[in-house]
Each structure stands twice: as structure tokens, then as C-alpha cells.
């Protein structure tokens, strides 16, 4: 178990109290066991790493009265590595998930989630990377961990963790950004698709200004031959408040390489009351003799006293042989709310 941060010092007659201590880091997960050597096509799969064997980060404690805002929570521990496969067309073990970030003390930011570890190097399909842990709640949501990369002949789709939601406050906190999708990596990643980017977290709803939506994660890059790029994550919605916040931008699609199609851009998040919609993510570039990704649509502007502007449409993906797709129009702005009667 990770330790919690120590309490802040007391305020003096003039001086402010000390900061709260930082929470401890979670313990890493255990690694999977490798199977015995096996030359047949029926070789055993590698064991997965321990799921959430990674401990969560400890919570940062608040400073004592009169202290400056408390420190952040501790970061989540890494997931355990997936084991290698034995020699056969089998699947490497998946990486364990990263532990969640500890919650921030009042005024402290949430810690980022642990990063998903890479997969085993099996001959054939690499296992998926572990998901990043969610960011802890706090003044700002922690970012999602990045997905692990897939290895071997067909890279696994490492999925980025979702961004944590922003904490509540007088002014809304921003949502965490989505994690980046894992790429299909290694010397033999011919057909592996890139992982999808995680979605951005939603901004907090508050009485004051709503929080800004998190940005969607970028898609991972495809494998060397015919590997498609991953899709960009969607932007988070802007928080609803007295004044709405902007939606997050969609993530960019990953690029394909030779023969691989580009990933699609993520859609922009919707704006809060009166907030602007987020821009759509750009489509990923195409490989030779393949198609570029379609860019994401702009988010819709939020309803408000003055209508929110529509989000801009994402740029078209670049093509090497096939021309890039044209840009979609931006999202529509919402109508303004009716005035109060006299």
C-alpha cells in the first residue's frame, strides 16, 4: 500500500502553513510467467501481467488551516509486463493496467494514471498494452496513461487510458487529456493497427465557469505493411456552469505506412452553456496506395445567453497517392437563450 502524504505544518502568526506532503507511488504489478519452450503451433500463451497489481497512488493530505493548497496525490504504479510467448503463432501476454492516480488534496491536482506496459514479444500477435489508470480527481483531472506498444508480427492495440474528470470547484476544473494509443512496433509489425487514443475527460459542472473538456488522445501509428493508424480520441465536453467552457479538441488519427489507411480524427467535444465546441481532430496520413483518414467533425456550440460558436472542422488527412479528404464543416452554433422578462 502506498503511503499518504504527511500533513502540512501549522500556520504561524504571520507565515502560512506548510504544504501537505505528496502521496506515495503505487507498487508495480507483477510480471507474467513465461511458458516453457515449445516448437509446435499449439504453444501456450504468455501469462498476462497482474491487472491492477499496481497499487493506486496515495492521497495527498491537505495543508492545515492557513496552509497553501494541498499537494497532489501520488502517481499510480505501473502495470506488470506481459510475458513472452514460446515459439509458435500465439499471443503474448497483455500488460497489466496502471494503477489509478491518488486523489489530490483540496486544491491539489489529481496525479496521472500509470502507463500501460509493453506486451510480450510473441511470434505472431503481440498482446495489448495495459490501459493507463484514470487520473485522480482534483483541481484538474489527471491525464490518462498511454497505451503500451504491441510487439512482434502483429502489434497489439494499446489503448490509451481515459482522462480523469476535473474536480468540482468555484471555477470548473479542466478534464484530463486522453492517453495516446500504442503503436504497432518492432521489426516484424507488418499488419498491426495502431491503438486508438483515449477520449478526453469532461470538464466539471460548477456554479461558476464550467471546466474545459480534455483533448482526445492521438491514435497510434500502424505497422510497416498494411497497418492502419489508430483513431483519435473524442474531445471531452465542456462543463456546464454560469458560463460554459469549450469542448476539447478531437485527437489526430495515426498514420498508416505502406498500404495502411490513416486513422480517423476524433470528434470535438460539445461546448457548455455558451461555450465553443471543440475542433475536430485531423485525419491521419495514408500510406502508399491507401486511403487517408477522415477528420473528425467539429463539436456543437453550447446553449447559452449568447449562443456558442460551432467548433471548427478538422483538417483533411494528407495522402501520398490518394488525395486527402476534404474538410468537414464546423459544428453549428447553438441558439442564444431567451432574455428574462422585464
Image (cartoon, rainbow, N blue to C red):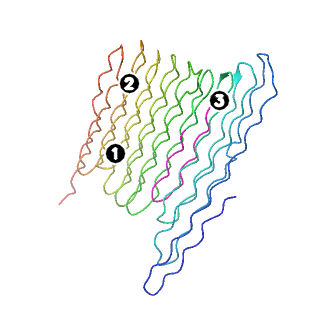
Which residue in the protein does label 2 denote? 294
**Mark 2 or 3, closer to the camera:** 3
In this picture, is 21 found above or below 213? Answer: below
Q: Earlier in the sequence, mark 1 or mark 2?
A: 1
Determine whether the residue tagged by mark 2 lies in a helix, strand or loop: loop
Q: Magenta segment: does it hold 61?
A: no
Q: Which residues are magenta?
A: 127-146
In 3D space, how far apart are the residues under numbered discs 2 and 3 (Cα atoms)?
27 Å
Q: Left or right of 254: which side holds 186?
A: right
Q: Earlier in the sequence, mark 2 or mark 3?
A: 3
Residue 202 is situated, as x and y percent measured from the top left of the image, at 44, 47
**What residue is rendered at 79% in x and 16% in y?**
40
In this picture, is 212 found above or below 19? Answer: above
Q: Quadrant of residue 243?
A: bottom left
Q: Quadrant of residue 294?
A: top left
Which residue in the protein does label 3 denote? 127
Determine whether the residue tagged by mark 3 lies in a helix, strand or loop: loop
Q: Magenta segment: does it hold 136?
A: yes
Amino acid at each position: 500500500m502506498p503511503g499518504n502524504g504527511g500533513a502540512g505544518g501549522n500556520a504561524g502568526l504571520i507565515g502560512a502553513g506548510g504544504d501537505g506532503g505528496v502521496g506515495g507511488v503505487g507498487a508495480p504489478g507483477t510480471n507474467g510467467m513465461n511458458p516453457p519452450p515449445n516448437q509446435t503451433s499449439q504453444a501456450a500463451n504468455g501469462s498476462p501481467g497482474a491487472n491492477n497489481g499496481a497499487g493506486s497512488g496515495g492521497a495527498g493530505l491537505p495543508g492545515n488551516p492557513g496552509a497553501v493548497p494541498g499537494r497532489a496525490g501520488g502517481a499510480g504504479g505501473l502495470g506488470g509486463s506481459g510475458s513472452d510467448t514460446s515459439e509458435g503463432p500465439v499471443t503474448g501476454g497483455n500488460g497489466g493496467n496502471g494503477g489509478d492516480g491518488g486523489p489530490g488534496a483540496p486544491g491539489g491536482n489529481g496525479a496521472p494514471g500509470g502507463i500501460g506496459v509493453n506486451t510480450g514479444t510473441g511470434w505472431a500477435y503481440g498482446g495489448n498494452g495495459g490501459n493507463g489508470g484514470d487520473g485522480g480527481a482534483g483541481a484538474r483531472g489527471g491525464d490518462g496513461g498511454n497505451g503500451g506498444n504491441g510487439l512482434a508480427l502483429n502489434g497489439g492495440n494499446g489503448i490509451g487510458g481515459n482522462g480523469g474528470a476535473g474536480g468540482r470547484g468555484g471555477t470548473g476544473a479542466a478534464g484530463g487529456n486522453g492517453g495516446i494509443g500504442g503503436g504497432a512496433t518492432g521489426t516484424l509489425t507488418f499488419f498491426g493497427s495502431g491503438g486508438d487514443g483515449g477520449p478526453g475527460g469532461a470538464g466539471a459542472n460548477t456554479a461558476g465557469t464550467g471546466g474545459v473538456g480534455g483533448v482526445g488522445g492521438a491514435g497510434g501509428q500502424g505497422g510497416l505493411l498494411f497497418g492502419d493508424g489508430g483513431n483519435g480520441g473524442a474531445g471531452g465536453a465542456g462543463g456546464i456552469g454560469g458560463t460554459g467552457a469549450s469542448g476539447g479538441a478531437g485527437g489526430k488519427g495515426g498514420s498508416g505506412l505502406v498500404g495502411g489507411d490513416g486513422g480517423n480524427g476524433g470528434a470535438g467535444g460539445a461546448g457548455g452553456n455558451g461555450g465553443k465546441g471543440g475542433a475536430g481532430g485531423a485525419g491521419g496520413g495514408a500510406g502508399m496506395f491507401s486511403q487517408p483518414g477522415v477528420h473528425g467533425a467539429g463539436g456543437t456550440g453550447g446553449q447559452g445567453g449568447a449562443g456558442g460558436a460551432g467548433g471548427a472542422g478538422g483538417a483533411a488527412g494528407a495522402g501520398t497517392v490518394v488525395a486527402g479528404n476534404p474538410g468537414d464543416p464546423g459544428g453549428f452554433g447553438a441558439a442564444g437563450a431567451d432574455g428574462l422578462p422585464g
